[in-house]
Image (tube, rainbow, N blue to C red):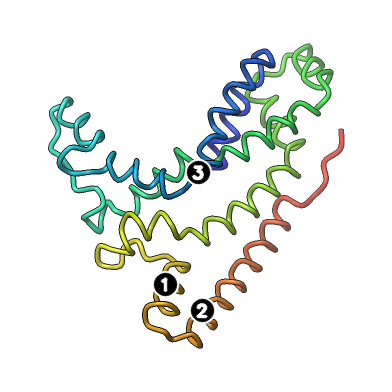
Amino acid sequence: MWLGKALLVTVLIYPFRKSIRTFFKAAFYLPHVTSSVIISMIWLWVFNPNFGLLNYLMTLLGLDPVIWLGRSLTAMPSLIIMQVIMGGGSTIVLLSAAMASIPEYYFEAATLEGASSWAIFRKITVPLLKPTILYALVMGTIANFQTFSNIYIMTSGGPEFSTTTIAYLIYETAFENYNLGLASAMSMVMFVILVVLGVIQFKWLGSNVEY
């Protein structure tokens, strides 16, 4: 989801002049260099069931407030939505640099041949961005598996273990239960999972594209 958002934003801001593109890239990149603790505290206020911004907007629409982080049904989707909205800044910068390196005559030739915007995006833009997309996908997958601070601050793995990720479970096992052997084994399992996912991603996107 975050990669799709980054690719969409990159394509949308690409036609603008350089100064406008720089503004949007800086705006989307800012959360990436902001402390995850600060971001988590802000989103705790957004999701607050009593005076949070999200429930305030829902009451304006005539909807009932929701305990976003206090229900197992909504806790993990809420954290995922937060990650999608706040994430992808570095990927947008990478994809923007990669798009700037694509020769303009590819797009001009496709336009003269009558290709639609969707066809240009699918047949030219995406294939030529595959190396950058592959890098962003691999690094993003690793980063998502290592998500810890947001969960530690916002939900502590609850409610009912609905937001307990592998990284948070390893932390609990090692530093709260002091079972270092089991935590090490869990870390190795996560490493193997990441290796397998990385191999699959390289097989899927690793082919070179030439025009």
> Pointer 2: what residue?
186
Label 1 – label 2 distance at C-alpha:
9 Å
The type of residue carrying mark 3 is Met
**Image x and y of residue 145, in percent:** 52, 61
Give the total of numbered labels.
3
Q: Is residue 186 above or below residue 98?
A: below
| Pointer 2 with pointer 3, Cβ within 8 A | no
Three-letter code for the amino acid on which mark 2 is drawn: Met
Q: Are marks 1 and 2 in contact (CB under 8 Å)?
A: yes
Q: Which mark is residue 129?
A: none
Residue bearing the label numbered 3 = 1
- Relative side of 202 to 187, left or right: right
Mark 1 or 2 closer to N-term? 1
Q: Identify the residue at horizontal 66%, vertical 68% (top origin).
A: 195
Closer to the camera in the image, 176 or 15? 176
Q: Residues within 10 Å of mark 2 (few under 14, many from 20)?
A: some
Q: Callout 1: helix, strand or loop? A: helix
Q: Which residue is mark 1?
A: 169
Would you call the spot at circle 3 few (<14 residues within 10 Å), some (14-19), or many (20 or more)?
few
The label nearer to you, 3 versus 1, is 1
Q: Is residue 62 left or right of residue 198?
A: left
Horizontal relation, residue 39 to residue 72: left or right: right
Q: Quadrant of residue 14?
A: top right
